[in-house]
Image: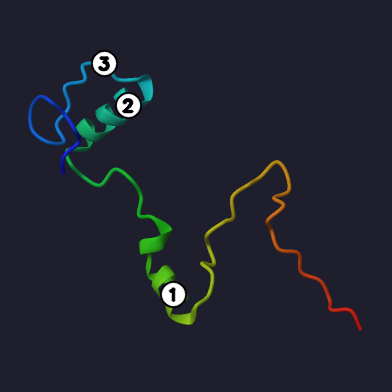
């Protein structure tokens, strides 16, 4: 994959900017883990997700994102007019 870099291997980086605090924390956590799985299993890869996909149903334990305002694209469900 070519990234347009003039130096080094394609996809390589020559950027020497220091890591941010968040990036440094992630790097330290990965180094301490000894290459074990650091992140938890995402809900999309759980057995429950497989069952939900087979039934074309939502994930039961997957909480919707919390919002501080109403999303105008959210559907509104109501009884039909008689």
Instruction: Work out whether 52 lies above or below 24.
Output: below
Q: Which residue is drawn at 50% across and 78% down?
A: 56
Residue 77 in the image, given as x and y percentages of width and height: 76, 69
- Relative to 70, 23 lies left or right: left
Mark 3 element type: loop
Badge number at residue 23: 2
Give residue 22's quadrant in the image.
top left
Residue 8 in the image, given as x and y percentages of width and height: 7, 27
Mark sitting earlier along the chain (2/1) = 2
Q: Nearer the viewer, mark 1 or mark 3?
A: 3
Badge number at residue 17: 3
Instruction: Work out whether 6 lies above or below 54.
Output: above
User: 10 Å neighbourhood of mark 1: few (<14), some, or many (≥20)?
Assistant: few
Q: In which quarter of the image is the C terminus?
A: bottom right
Viewer-side residue, 73 vs 45? 73
The residue indicated by pointer 1 is: 53
Give residue 46's quadrant in the image.
bottom left
Q: Quadrant of the N terminus?
A: top left
- Relative to 40, 8 lies left or right: left
Q: Residue furthest right?
A: 82
User: 10 Å neighbourhood of mark 2: few (<14), some, or many (≥20)?
Assistant: few
Mark 1 element type: helix
Q: Are marks 1 and 3 in contact (CB under 8 Å)?
A: no
Mark sitting earlier along the chain (2/3) = 3
Q: How far apart are marks 2 and 3 (CA)?
A: 12 Å
Residue 5 in the image, given as x and y percentages of width and height: 16, 29
């Amino acid at each position: 994959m070519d990234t347009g870099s003039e130096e080094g291997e394609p996809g390589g980086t020559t950027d020497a900017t220091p890591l941010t605090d968040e990036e440094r924390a992630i790097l330290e956590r990965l180094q301490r883990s000894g290459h074990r799985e650091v992140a938890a299993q995402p809900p999309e890869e759980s057995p429950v997700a497989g069952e939900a996909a087979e039934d074309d149903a939502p994930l039961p334990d997957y909480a919707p994102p919390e919002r501080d305002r109403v999303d105008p694209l959210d559907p509104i469900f109501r009884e039909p007019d008689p």
